Structures are given as structure tokens and as C-alpha cells.
Image (cartoon, rainbow, N blue to C red):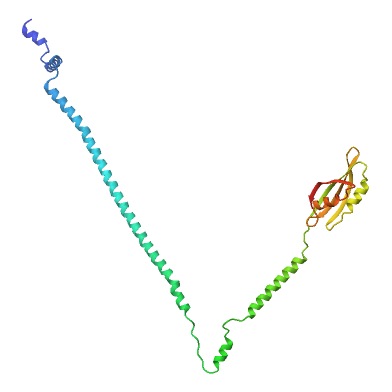
Amino acid sequence: MSGLQCLASENIWFDKQRYDEAEKCFYEGANGPSTHQQQAKTTLQHAKGRQPKRQHRNSSSHGDQELVSRMKSLELENQTLNKVIESMRAALQKLETRVAVLEKTPAAAAVPSAKAAPVKQVNGDDDDDDDDDIDLFGSDDEDDEAERLKKERIDAYTAKKAKKPVLIAKSSILLDVKPWDDETDMAKLEECVRTVQMDGLLWGASKLVPVGYGIKKLQINCVVEDDKVGTDILEEEITKFEDFVQSVDVAAFNKI
């Protein structure tokens, strides 16, 4: 086989671009990337680094715009409040002026009323007739009538109160009258107790209650008016019968 025939069977010339690319990759792997690629990487990194700065600038400008808009809204609100305050001040001033005028009005109105009413002047005998008709000091008839009505009302109230029954306070008292011993005549003792009589005292039922050792005490009931009779007086009057009575005790006391 000749050399031309050998070259004709090879396809290296048709795939030259692929072989060049492979050779380039081989040398780059052995010697590192070329200067052109390094410059391209650096440019790409710078572009990536500038992008956040631009974004930061965009965000800062947006924040400034928002701050300016808020300041404008606050200024508008402040102007509105100033207008409201001015209107309130004007209303307050008007109110103070009106109050001052009203305070001065009663004093001014009192001046004409203090003036004396004009007196009609007449001549001749008409002066005497006018003096008789005009009573400068007033009549005593009205005072007498009022006093009479007052006295009549007082008398009517007194009479009505006198007719009304008065409520008398009364109490029911149960007394224990003790003898000296078992030989004391209890019938005579009760008779002595009932001899105690006074205004506002009314004796009631009685009974003998055993005490012990054959001794019995007299238990007697009475009704008294509180304003006239008291327990102290009853005890004092009953204990005067020294031959029969040893002591007197209040067993029960009830208001009626």
C-alpha cells in the first residue's frame, strides 16, 4: 500500500477541530488556564460584585423616597392641627367676650330699677284723696289674718292629739317569794304580798313551787305599768314582811 492510500484511509483532517480542542484541553490541564480565561473570570466576578451594590443603592433610594413621603404627610397633618387649634382659640375668645358681656348686663339692668318711679303731681284737694288711697306701710289686716289662721291650725292639731289614745308601756313580771323555812304559813305570806297595792300594779295568778327539804316558794305573777311601777319598788315593799319573806327574786320579765 502506498502512502497516498494510507492517508486516504485516515479521517484526521476531517475532525481537525475536535483534535485541536482536545489538544487545547490537554495543555490547559498541564499548564493551567490561559490569561484570556483568567481575565474573563475576573470580569465575571466584578460584575457579580457590582450587582449587590446597585441593588443596595436602589433599596436606599427607595427608603429615602418613603421617608420624604412620610415627612410630607406629617407636615400636612401638622398644618391641619394648627388650623383646628386656631379655630378653637377663636371660639374660646368669643365665649370669653360673651361671658364678660353677660356679667356686666345685670349690673346695668339694676340701675333703671333703682330709680324711683315718677310721682304724679296734682293740685288742690286731690292730694288728700291720693294719700288716703295709697298705704305706704301696708295694712295690718293681712298679718292679723295669717296669725289667726296659724292659731286655729295649732288648736286643731292640739285637740286631735289629745283625742288620740296614748300607748301605755306595760310589762309582765313573775316573782319568786321565798319563805324562811318549811313552817312558814304560805297562805298568810301570799295574803301579805297581795296587800301591796299601788297605781299601775295588778296581781295575777300564783302557785307554790317546791324548793327542797319540804320548803316551798310562792311564784306569783303581776302586770305593771313601766312608767309607774318598777321591780325595785316591788321587792322593797314585799320584803317589808320580814316575819314571812326571806327574799324576792325576778323569775321572768316580759314586755307586753
Q: Residue furthest bottom?
A: 124
Which one is in front, 18 or 200? 200
Q: Residue furthest left?
A: 3
Which one is in front, 109 or 49? 109
Which one is in front, 202 or 21? 202
Which one is in front, 216 or 152? 216
Q: Splitting the image into 4 quarters, where does residue 41 fall?
A: top left
Q: How many marks?
A: 0
**101 in relation to 220, above or below:** below
**123 in relation to 144, above or below:** below
Which residue is rendered at x = 32% and y = 56% of the image?
Answer: 82
**4 in relation to 33, above or below:** above
Q: Splitting the image into 4 quarters, where does residue 137 fall?
A: bottom right
Image coords of residue 85 (percent x, y): 35, 57
Image coords of residue 130 (percent x, y): 56, 89
Which residue is rendered at x = 8% and y = 10% of the image?
Answer: 7
Q: Quadrant of the N terminus?
A: top left
Left or right: 106 with respect to 252?
A: left
Image coords of residue 24 (percent x, y): 13, 17
